Every structure is written in structure tokens, then in C-alpha cells.
Image (cartoon, helix red, strand yellow):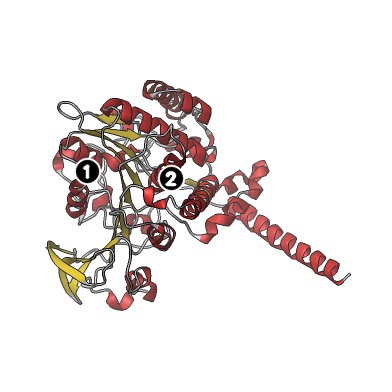
Amino acid sequence: MRLRKVAVALAILIFAVLATVFAVRAYDSLRGPPLAPWHTFVPDELSVAEMDATDWTGYLAAEERIFQSVLDNVTRELPEAYRVSYDRYFADAPIFPGSFPQDFNRSYVLEPDGEPKGAVLLLHGLTDAPYSLRHVAELYRTYGFVAVVMRMPGHGTVPAGLTRAVWEDWMAATRLGVRDAVARAGEGAPLHIVGYSNGGALAVKYALDALQDDRLAQPDRLVLLSPMIGVTRFARFSGLAALPAIFPPFIKAAWLNIIPEYNPFKYNSFPVNAATQTYELTTELQSEIEATVRRGDIGRLPPILAFQSAIDFTVSARAVVNALYDRLEDNGSELVLFDVNRAANVEDLLRDSADTAVARLLPPGVRKYRATVIGNAGLEQPAAVERTVAPGDTAEVVRLLGVDYPADVFSMSHIALPFPPSDGLYGSHPDPADDTFGVSLGTIAPRGETGALIVGLDSLLRVSSNPFYAYVARRIEEGIPTE
């Protein structure tokens, strides 16, 4: 009887919590801007079975149909209120991707001069587009690799695409991309996979899957940028936030953010389903890592080179260390962490969690992977150094990089790592020759009163390019075979 009373009380408590969440989200969904056409029209992507059965030509044909449907149902039907210069879906806006020399929302291939020496598949992040890895793709091309840059289903078109996409779709696209990359370079040629953010999770999971499935080509190297190995605990419960959306008056509850779409190659609006998929993908990934360790197969993974900011608001930097790198064998892998800038005159304003992030991520001890930290030469010294500890060792080797940590940057960000300062869209010092995207988001440094802009200041103040990109490129180059 007593246990029954406890169970009833627990059930009442759970119901009360769910009812409270429902009421708060329902009320909140009635506030803010209305849904725009790009929040309600969902393009029809290929299914998992269709992607597994098709090739690159078939994928591009389907992609063309998808983009045409967005043009017909969103751009050409755009209400007058959205026909403004900062809207990526307005055909006459300077940021309309369809007017650029190349629409980097679409999948593309970079062919090298001469016969390919190898192949690389590049996988972008959540809400992102193939644009984000164009510099790394070009780097590989210059070294004789054919670079296949995939658009993940639900991306590059309209944010509503992410209300229906599931992580299994992205894995199917990854398998398709690998098949095409191998076909272009030939069987036996070196195969690399580069993954940024969500693409990092897909890259690692594909490599793990390939250990168990002989039909999948095994990569020879993984390069990860801000990899999504784990996400915040909130993502576990993100699906609850969308509960009121089952009733039409509260449809906006299906969205965590509804923001104007002023970025030509990245969604600003963010649906609840996207957060749910990140949780499900990283949960599956971590389970597969542990299963691979138990089977004794983790040592068969290829070398992994990962670059990660010690401060990351989007993914869990701790999971990169604990859930991935600490599980690896000594196979030539390396983790590069970017520390905060201790010469940026904000030392007293840093949270303790930021100030001690590297020390907490990499406590003293022997590791099976090379650990590198990029930071200041000393307190209040802008000169940047590389501090490296080899696997099986505890001695630190310090090397000056010959560049300073910029005084106006107090830390790297999740989004900055793949973009050089010269990038035309995100760069802090965009190359005029690359200024073809209608806006230079990386140069915006707003000062004024809160509430005056159509977007929050956080999104504009977040550093969007990497002052150490030349270092990142050099480290990637070291692992590209030249013969």
C-alpha cells in the first residue's frame, strides 16, 4: 500500500511538471514574431532507403528538385513584409544565394589537377551548409585530393527542413558521399573524412560502423572541427518543449528560436526537432564507442585529429575528451585545444569555468593521444604558443607560433574554427576578392542600445573566424599524403 501511494505521488508530480512545461511553452509560443514561409514549407528530401540506393548524380538531381521547390513555394510566394534586403529568401536581396557565382548551400565536388591522389568527404554542421568547409576542401584539392562536400538532408534550403530530418538521414548521406569519393579516387586510394560540429559526430560514427560492416569503405584519417561528441543535458528533454505544437494555436512551440534569416549559408531559426536529433545521434555515438571498446576493436579506428575550443557553448568539450579521446588506443591521434586569451584584458571578467577550462579538460597524467594546447606564452603576453604533450609522456614541449592572440578576441568559439580571417562572409578581415556574398558578418562590431536590432547581440558578438586558421591548415596538411 505504501509503495502504491509513493507511485501515485510520483505520477502526480510528473504530471504536474509536464503540465507546467506545457503551459509555459504554450504561453511563450504566443509571443514573438510569427512563423514565416520558410518555417512552414518542408521540402521533400530523399529517404534513407533512396539515398542508400542512389549515387551522386541521383542525389544532385533530387537536390535540384528540392531547391526548385523552395524557389516556387517560398521565394516566389514571399509576402511583401519579407521582401527586404536582409532576407536570404528575397530574390532581389544582396544576400540571396541564388544570385551568387556559386550557391554554397548545395553539394559540390572540387577536382584536383591531374589524377586524384586520394579522396576526402567533408561533412558540415547542424543548421549549416557546405559553405563552412570550402576552405578545407580547397586545401585538400591543392594536395591532389578530390573533395566531395555533402549537403546534409534538411540543410541549405529552409529551416523547416530540420523539423522533419532525422539523424539517420544524415548517416545515409554520409554513406553516399563516401561511395562517391571512393569511386572518384579509385579503390585503395587514401580516404579522409572531415567533420565540422554535427559532421564530426557523423564522421566518427561512420568510422565505427565501417569496423563492423565490410561493405563500408574504411577511412584512413578523420579530421574533426568542433566535433559534436556530446551535447548539453537540456537536449535530452528538448522534445518536451514542442508538446504544445500538437495544437495549431501553439505551433510556434515547435521552434526554440525564430530569428530573421540574414545569413545566406546558415539557418538562424532553430526547431526543437534539431535539438532532439543531436541528442539521439550523440547518445547512439557514445554507445557505439563503448561497445567498440568492449569488443576490443577501438584500436582499429584511424588516427583522429580534432580541433576544439576549450570554451564551447554549442557542444560539450568535455565529451570530446571523456567520451572519445580517453577511449582511444595509441593510434597517432591528436587533440588540439584552444585556450582563452589571457592577454585580452578581460581576465577579471572570465567565469571560473572558462579560466580553468583547459586544466579541467586535460588533468595531469599519461594519455594515449597527443594533446596540444594553443594559448598565450604567459599571463598578459599576446604571443601565441603551442604546448604539446606526446602520448605516453608528461613532459610539455613549447613552441612559439609567430602570431599573437588578437587583443579583441577573448576566446575561440564553436563556429569559428573552419574559417580564416580572410573569409568573405565570416572573416574578421575579409579578402576583397571573396566579397561576393552581400554581407560581411565577421566585421560587424555593433555598439548601441539593447533591443534596437532585429537580432540579439550574442549572435553578432560571437567570434566567427579563426585567427589561428593558418595553424589548423598546416596541421591538416601534415597528414595529407603527397605520393
Please identify the quarter of the rendering in which residue 124 is found: top left
**Frontmost residue, 117 versus 264:** 117
Residue found at x 49% / y 29%:
45
**Dot 1 or dot 2, earlier in sequence:** 2
Percent position of residue 180, x then y: 34, 28
Near mark 2 (Cα within 10 A), the count class, few <14, some 14-19 or many ≥20, is many
Q: Secondary structure at mark 2?
A: helix
Q: Position of residue 42 (x, y in %)?
A: 52, 32
Res. 405 mark: none
Q: CA distance from mark 1 to mark 2?
A: 36 Å
Q: Is residue 256 left or right of residue 370?
A: right
User: Which residue lies under the disc numbered 2?
Assistant: 208
Q: The residue under label 2 is which amino acid type?
A: Leu
Can you name the residue that lies furthest to the front here? 296
Question: In this rendering, does residue 160 appear at all?
Answer: no
Q: Locate residue 133, reporting x and y percent.
A: 29, 42
Q: Which residue is mark 1?
A: 424
Is any atom of residue 405 visible in this view? yes
